[in-house]
Image: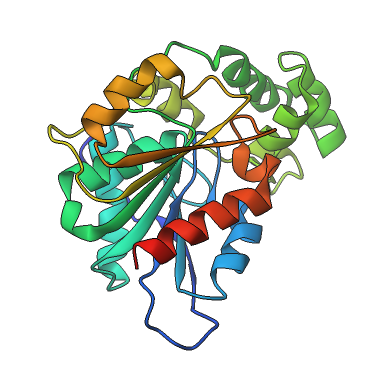
């Protein structure tokens, strides 16, 4: 597969349980080393009032592995998935790396986004910060653990944080040899890491309604990034969730859901 090849993404597509069918769908895009599965509890809540779609980005979850982690390529993957589902316009929510995918999608295809919600990321370039995580997953690949306890011990050689290890363990599946293996395209992700930590793609501002949710205990949306954020997302409303870090949707799930619901209702 070449760097510009499109990937047929794995999608969770949940119908609107209200039966009204008068609300625009919500599209949810996970972050680096995450997956649509990480969002299932949130998806079930939002499904009560609208159709909800969550994707596994390329090299993540159940989606195929492919070279190229540019934000243009990843946003085009998402657009093709929406085309196949017959979704012309939707609210778009992205967390972390998925937030940059969402920003790119909105900048390059603004007619497809009724509103944009970005969770704890700014449209700026970041420094390297995942070396220990990559090393931990590589250790699991080499160690071939036979259960999650053994896998956690291998992860702990590089990652001290228990919550981080539990998150990384969501990427482990049992293979035919009864070994725990890493299901993400780790090689492709590492080769594409410079693009991942870079700015989102697109050469114009997204002028539509935008909500930026940041964790009070996170450094991912610092005050010195706000000018760059306003340049790319001029209508952005920035809301800080207390007692929340980078995984703010896990730290404060109810507050996160309420903020998203309120924003979508205001931009129906």
Tell me what residue is drawn at x 59 percent, y 49 percent. Answer: 256
Give x and y (percent) for residue 265.
43, 66
Give the colouring mode of the picture: rainbow
Tell me where residue 189 sits by quadrant.
Answer: top left
Q: Is residue 182 left or right of residue 227?
A: right
Image position of 9 (left or right of 205): right
Image spot of residue 32 (x, y percent) = 50, 33
Q: Residue at x 61, y 58 (%)?
A: 42
Rendered residue at 55%/82% (across/down) = 17
Residue farthest left in this picture: 203
- Classify 149 as above or below 110: above
Q: Looking at the image, which is closer to me, 197 or 77?
A: 197
| Image location (x, y in percent) of residue 105 | 25, 46
Where residue 226 appears, as percent x and y from the top left, is 35, 23
Is residue 259 shown to the viewer in this render?
yes
Q: Which image quadrant for residue 196?
A: top left
Q: Can see residue 1?
A: no
Q: Is residue 10 left or right of residue 71?
A: right
Q: Return the residue nearer the eye: 185 or 213.
A: 213
Q: Is residue 24 left or right of residue 156?
A: left
Residue at 58%, 55% (x, y): give it: 257
Q: Is residue 27 above or below residue 119?
A: below
Quadrant holding the C terminus: bottom left
Q: Is residue 143 above or below residue 90?
A: above
Q: How many marks?
A: 0
Q: Residue furthest bottom?
A: 19
């Amino acid at each position: 597969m070449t760097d510009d090849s499109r990937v047929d993404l794995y999608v969770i597509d949940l119908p609107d349980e209200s039966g009204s069918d008068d609300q625009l769908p919500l599209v949810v895009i996970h972050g680096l080393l995450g997956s649509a599965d990480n969002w299932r509890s949130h998806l079930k809540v939002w499904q009560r009032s609208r159709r909800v779609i969550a994707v596994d980005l390329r090299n993540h979850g159940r989606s195929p592995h492919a070279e190229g982690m540019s934000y243009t390529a990843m946003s085009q993957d998402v657009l093709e998935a929406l085309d196949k589902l017959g979704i012309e316009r939707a609210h778009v929510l992205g967390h972390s790396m998925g937030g940059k995918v969402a920003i790119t999608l909105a900048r390059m295809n603004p007619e497809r986004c009724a509103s944009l919600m970005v969770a704890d990321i700014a449209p700026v370039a970041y420094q390297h910060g995942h070396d220990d995580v990559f090393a931990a997953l590589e250790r699991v690949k080499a160690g071939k653990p036979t259960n999650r306890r053994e896998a956690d011990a291998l992860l702990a050689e590089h990652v001290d944080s228990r919550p981080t290890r539990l998150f990384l363990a969501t990427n482990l599946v049992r293979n035919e040899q009864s070994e725990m293996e890493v299901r993400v395209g780790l090689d492709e992700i590492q080769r594409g890491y410079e693009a991942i930590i870079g700015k989102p793609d697109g050469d114009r501002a997204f002028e539509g309604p935008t909500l930026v949710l940041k964790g009070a205990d996170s450094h991912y949306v610092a005050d010195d990034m706000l000018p760059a954020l306003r340049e790319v997302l001029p209508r952005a409303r920035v809301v800080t969730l207390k007692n929340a870090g980078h995984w703010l949707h896990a730290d404060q799930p109810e507050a996160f859901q309420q903020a998203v619901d309120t924003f979508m209702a205001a931009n129906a």
